[in-house]
Amino acid sequence: MLELLDKVKENRDSALSEIAEAAGRAGRQPEDVSIMAVTKTHPVEYISAAVNCGIRHIGENRISEGGRKIRQLGSDYAIFHAIGVLHRKEVRQAVRDFHCLDAVHKIEIIEEIARRKASPQILLEVNTSGETAKKGFPPDVGLLENIIGRAIELELPVKGFLTVGPLGGDSVLQRKAFADLRVIRDSLESRLKVSLPELSMGMSDDFTLAVLEGSTMVRLGRRLFGSRGG
């Protein structure tokens, strides 16, 4: 456990340094960006290592796997985010186990959450890269205005948005995908007169670019824990 803790701490410090450099270039404060530790397929010891290094946000892609870990550790152990595709049949367990549902991509999911009389923090996933293999609402301000309006009617707390940058390592396209989401968020805040503070953007390979474009939370798995093979 000590070896794992030391590795995570070293990797966290390195990531924080890069976040600070990118934030400075963008005229932002490093404290405005949080790290989420993505612990999918890892045992609970990895969650414990992240929390012991000061990381409070934990992301799990699979509802059933994440739920087992949360019940083992206790829901107060960290702030648990469901960051994978959320299916309607999984909503009951998701709202029971997770504090935040970060990848809501259908109006039917919003309505099912409301039907469960639950109020987790919600982020809407937006497909700003336009890649057909990805889930998410299209980057249409009018559509998203209607979606958020419906969530407000249902008294559900939409706190912002999530996107996944395009694959392939093209930094220009990656920055554009992140910048587009920031512009959409700013427009909707103005149109709806609501606060949408969270922009979950950037993963292990592109998080510094996301910080340059306004990310408030980066989702780091491999960067913190190394590859699955070691």
Image (spheres, rainbow, N blue to C red):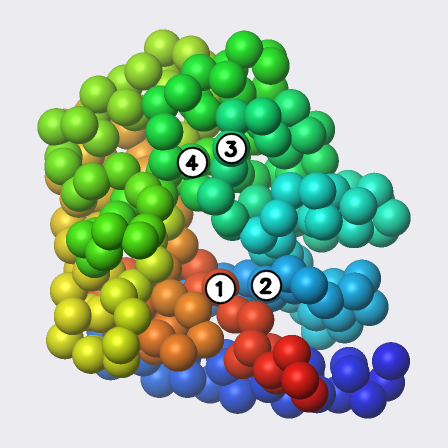
Amino acid type of the residue tagged 1 in the rendering: Arg
At mark 3, the secondary structure is loop
Query: Crowdedness of circle 2 by 10 Å Cα count: few (<14), some, many (20+)?
Result: many
Marking on residue 104: 4
Eye-nearest disc, 4 or 3? 3
Quick one: quadrant of the N terminus? bottom right
Residue that label 2 marks: 38
Kindly indicate whether the residue at mark 3 contacts the one at mark 1 (C-beta within 8 angstroms).
no
Kindly report the distance in space between the C-alpha atoms of the residues bearing marks 3 and 2: 20 Å
Report the residue at 40% width, 54% height from top: 200
Marking on residue 87: 3
N-terminal-most mark, 1 or 2: 2
Q: Nearer the viewer, residue 133 or 41?
A: 133
N-terminal-most mark, 1 or 3: 3
Amino acid type of the residue tagged 2 in the rendering: Val
Quick one: quadrant of the C terminus? bottom right
Instruction: Name the side, left or right, on which 128 lies relative to 84.
Output: left
At mark 4, the secondary structure is strand
Kindly indicate whether the residue at mark 4 contacts the one at mark 1 (C-beta within 8 angstroms).
no
Q: Residue 219: percent from the left, percent from the top?
A: 49, 64
Position of 72 relative to 148 (above/below): below
Query: Crowdedness of circle 1 by 10 Å Cα count: few (<14), some, many (20+)?
Result: many
Kindly indicate whether the residue at mark 2 contacts the one at mark 4 (C-beta within 8 angstroms).
no
Eye-nearest disc, 1 or 4? 4
N-terminal-most mark, 3 or 2: 2
Residue that label 1 marks: 219
Position of 117 relative to 33 (above/below): above
Kindly indicate whether the residue at mark 3 contacts the one at mark 4 (C-beta within 8 angstroms).
no
Amino acid type of the residue tagged 4 in the rendering: Val
Report the residue at 57% width, 52% height from top: 61
